Image (tube, rainbow, N blue to C red):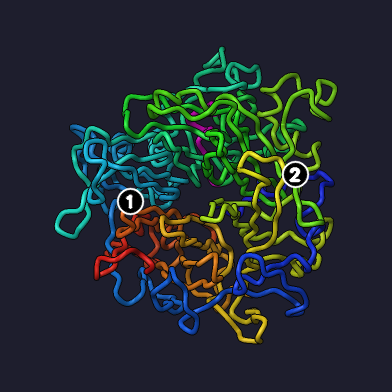
């Protein structure tokens, strides 16, 4: 998920081709016809949501009837399903001795917030219970808290500003680890829990990999460049085969005050003159003033590995995986036993990455793989016009990545991954976000939108995506040659999303499917269902190409049949994000982020009437991000 801040979203001024420059309608896939059905000339323009759609079609995976588009301030699911709210912002996570309840006037202190669920839930994963791994009725939930809305976080919003408010805002960021269990059909937090944990923008961490100790990561407070402080703007996430959690730092740059004249490196990462957009941390926490601490921004933008089973462990920023506006980190295992991590960078005209570990995954969990992600090769994707592509290695001394080009060593290549990708000729993408993998080995990436496509001075659209001002986005997919660690791949478009008026037909002329726009979250469950979540911005929702799509939603796709059905719609102003399930597939957890968000993305604490007061629906309350639990009333697998 990325907010509409131009600082990081439009800093790529390289001349690399866009995905539209290299696509050809002869390779587009009508997914209703199956994985291999290449189709040409079916529609002109080809701009809708291609699905196998709705109740008229059958799918071996999807057994529910699509829910309608909705503008209700609630979570709507199909008949036969139930929804429960769990772990809203401000609920105590279960730390020993910390029991302060959420106060509906937002008067909780910074210290209390440090022991409570953070704001704006995002990526989430369910982990087996440490003591009862065989059960699906108990486990750990670990999730991101992307950002804070200071208008809601403090009783008087930002009418006054002080160090305590900065500390509370920093405490509302980061990651929560909670223990949950099913008690007689209702899920709840276990409090206290020995595994409960809050990781915030102030939590001590470590650097691992080639960047650790690099000159560009050293600061006055950390002269060795090995001990960063905190993580923030944590968006998508991933889980490793050895049981650790990967949280991804996305739009970190707008937390920093920039210099009057940014360097070329700072400008490439979107750091600009003046105060940060919406945040004023630098006024009371000097490390967020890049005019005084120019290396501090370099210490963010990493994939951070956390061991949820060890609350005393130190989170590690894995520099070998590169620095980016990371949206997620999806881990596959190659046939040879190596970890392969796919990552999108959610910004206009940025890139898709893949990391392949040097060493093989070892049995023995986190301890046996403690440095696995510190050694390996980072690649960036180039999509070629013939439907093939290449993974280009970001390796110091290879091709243009030399000392003469401004890369002193491998650490600098990784810290300046954007610049390295520019020089390698990687393909600019339309905001690549979440990535996941289906049961046939296809890797999918949501490209949420790009309103700058075709604008003056920007790259123009072509036959692969005929919309200038691409407000609705699409999903691309590829299959690596031979195995996940291959350096070549075959690619096509899975779906071009669009408004209800832009649906496209199948080969028989039947209009098919449930339309959607701005695909963002992506997750494949154990049965092979591909779950798609949307993030239409509040400022655009209900307008233009989005006028008939209601609130943000979650859809279920059968990758084989092409059937895509709307499964859920969210409350007013929210984003649907993050999805996970118990091992038996009978309980799903998703996150409802920023319900009641205003178009400005900053709330007025004195607002007499809010767009949403979900989930509490209290006149004296405030909307709260929360995890929701979804169950099928007959006890069957979700989506069946």
Q: Is residue 227 visible?
A: yes
Provide the secondary structure element on which disc 1 rests.
Answer: loop
Q: Position of residue 635 (x, y in %)?
A: 25, 65
Mark identifier at residue 390: 2
Does 254 appear above or below 285? below
Q: Residues within 10 Å of mark 1 (few under 14, many from 20)?
A: some
Residue at 50% across, 47% down: 236
Marks 2 and 1 in Cβ contact (< 8 Å) = no
Q: Which residues are magenta?
A: 278-287
Front residue of 607 and 566: 566
Quadrant of the drawing holding the C terminus: bottom left
* Residue 615 is one of the magenta-drawn residues: no
Mark identifier at residue 583: 1
The residues bearing labels 2 and 1 have C-alpha atoms spaced at a distance of 35 Å
N-terminal label among 2 and 1: 2
| 399 to the left or right of 46 | right
**From this viewpoint, which residue is outermost toward the left?**
184
Does 174 appear above or below 498? above
Mark identifier at residue 443: none
Q: Position of residue 407 (x, y in %)?
A: 76, 23
Provide the secondary structure element on which disc 2 rests.
Answer: strand
Does 25 appear above or below 350? below
Front residue of 87 and 351: 351
Front residue of 96 and 282: 96
**From this viewpoint, which residue is outermost toward the top?**
224
Q: Position of residue 240 (x, y in %)?
A: 45, 38
Q: Residues within 10 Å of mark 2 (few under 14, many from 20)?
A: some
| 608 to the left or right of 31 | left
Figure quadrant of residue 412: top right
């Amino acid at each position: 998920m990325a907010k509409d801040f131009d600082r990081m979203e439009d800093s790529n001024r390289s001349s690399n081709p866009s995905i539209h420059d290299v696509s050809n309608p002869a390779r587009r896939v009508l997914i209703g016809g199956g994985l291999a059905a290449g189709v040409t000339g079916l529609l002109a323009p080809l701009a809708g949501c291609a699905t196998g759609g709705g109740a008229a079609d059958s799918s071996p995976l999807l057994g529910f009837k699509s829910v309608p588009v909705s503008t209700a301030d609630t979570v709507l699911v199909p008949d036969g399903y139930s929804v429960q709210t769990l772990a809203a912002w401000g609920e105590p996570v279960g730390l020993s001795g910390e029991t302060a309840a959420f106060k509906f006037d937002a008067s909780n202190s910074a210290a209390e917030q440090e022991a409570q669920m953070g704001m704006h839930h995002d990526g989430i994963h369910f982990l087996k219970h440490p003591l009862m791994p065989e059960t699906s009725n108990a486990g750990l939930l670990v999730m991101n808290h992307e950002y804070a809305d200071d208008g809601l976080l403090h009783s008087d919003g930002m009418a006054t500003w002080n160090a305590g408010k900065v500390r509370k805002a920093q405490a509302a960021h980061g990651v929560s680890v909670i223990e949950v269990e099913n008690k007689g059909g209702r899920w709840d937090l276990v409090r206290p829990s020995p595994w409960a944990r809050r990781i915030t923008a102030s939590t001590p961490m470590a650097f691992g990999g080639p960047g650790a100790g690099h000159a560009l990561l050293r600061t006055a407070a950390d002269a060795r460049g090995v001990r960063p402080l905190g993580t923030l703007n944590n968006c998508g996430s991933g889980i490793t085969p050895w049981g650790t959690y990967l949280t991804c730092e996305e739009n970190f740059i707008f937390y920093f005050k920039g210099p009057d004249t940014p360097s070329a490196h700072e400008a490439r990462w979107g750091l600009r003159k003046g105060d940060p957009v919406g945040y004023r941390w630098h006024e009371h926490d000097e490390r967020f003033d890049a005019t005084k601490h120019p290396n501090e921004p370099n210490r963010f933008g990493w994939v951070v590995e956390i061991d949820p089973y060890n609350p005393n462990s130190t989170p590690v920023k894995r520099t070998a995986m590169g620095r980016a506006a990371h949206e997620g980190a999806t881990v596959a295992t190659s046939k040879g036993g190596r970890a392969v991590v796919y990552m999108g960078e959610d910004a206009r005209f940025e890139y898709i990455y893949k990391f392949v570990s040097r060493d093989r995954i070892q049995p023995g969990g986190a301890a046996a793989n403690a440095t696995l992600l510190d050694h390996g090769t980072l690649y960036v994707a180039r999509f070629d016009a013939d439907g093939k592509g290449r993974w280009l290695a970001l390796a110091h001394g290879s091709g243009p990545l030399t000392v003469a080009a401004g890369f002193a060593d491998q650490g600098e290549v990784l810290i300046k991954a954007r610049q390295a990708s520019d020089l390698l000729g990687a393909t600019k993408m339309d905001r690549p976000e979440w990535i996941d993998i289906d049961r046939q080995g296809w890797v999918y990436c949501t490209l949420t939108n790009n309103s700058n496509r075709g604008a003056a001075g920007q790259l123009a659209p072509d036959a692969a995506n005929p919309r200038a001002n691409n407000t609705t986005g699409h999903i691309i997919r590829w299959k690596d040659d031979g195995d996940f660690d291959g350096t070549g791949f075959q690619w096509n478009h899975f779906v071009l999303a669009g408004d209800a008026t832009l649906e496209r037909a199948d080969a028989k002329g039947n209009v098919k499917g449930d339309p959607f726009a701005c695909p963002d979250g992506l997750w494949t469950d154990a049965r092979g269902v591909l779950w798609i979540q949307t993030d239409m911005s509040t400022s655009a929702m209900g307008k233009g190409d989005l006028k008939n799509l209601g609130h943000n939603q979650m859809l279920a796709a059968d990758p084989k049949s092409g059937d895509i059905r709307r499964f859920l719609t969210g409350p007013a102003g929210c984003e649907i994000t993050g999805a996970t399930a118990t091992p038996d597939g009978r309980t799903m957890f998703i996150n409802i982020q920023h319900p009641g968000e205003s178009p400005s993305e900053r709330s007025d604490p004195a607002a007499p009437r809010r767009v949403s007061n979900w989930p509490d629906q209290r006149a004296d309350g405030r909307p709260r991000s929360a995890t929701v639990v979804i169950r099928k009333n007959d006890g069957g697998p979700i989506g069946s």
